[in-house]
Image (cartoon, grey):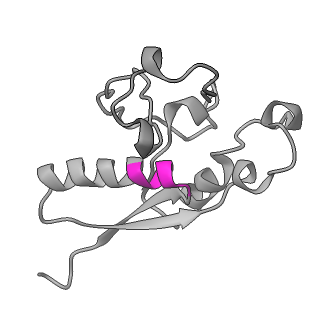
Amino acid sequence: MNENIKTIKVGSRKSELALIQTRFVIEKLSQVYPDKKFEIVTMSTTGDKILDKALPKIGEKSLFTKELEIALEQNCVDFVVHSLKDLPTTLPEGMAIGAICKREDPRDAVICHPKYKDKTLSTLPKGSVIG
């Protein structure tokens, strides 16, 4: 590998879902740019740190994006991966959505305890709790 190749730093929240999404984006980019090297830079956001309040009651915009945007502005990362649902409706000045990946199947899944592995929603025992 060429030592002079710049590592592309990708900003991501530390949550498991955010990291799955970030790895997915890097995998897709690596298929198009196999000679590029990517590094994930993780960080916690305000929304990740406030665990004792309902998020709508906080009232602050950019709960899950602000710290990543600051890292981008300060050139700590080259780009960031966000879940579109976390983005504010109006992006901060100088920010743009560079790409949107093809959406996976949006239908929900039911994951049951192994003892119910052969059950469906309609065949779960009466009184089962879902949620």
Nearer-the-camera pick, 6 or 104: 104
At 87% from the left edge and 38% from the top edge, which residue is drawn? 58
Residue found at the very far front of the displayed protein: 125
Which residue is at 42% across, 36% downward?
116
Q: Which residues are magenta?
A: 15-20
Q: Quadrant of residue 70?
A: bottom right
Residue 9 spot, x, y in % from top left: 40, 65
Q: Is residue 75 visible?
A: no
Q: Quadrant of the N terminus?
A: bottom left
Q: Position of residue 51 (x, y in %)?
A: 80, 51
In the picture provided, is 122 more to the left or to the right than 25? right
**Depicted 115 relative to depicted 101: above or below:** below
Q: What residue appears at the point 50 percent right and 38 percent down from the top-left corner?
A: 83
Tell which of 10 and 98 is nearer to you.
10
Q: Is residue 53 left or right of residue 95?
A: right
Q: As rendered, which of 40 and 33 lies closer to the eye?
A: 40
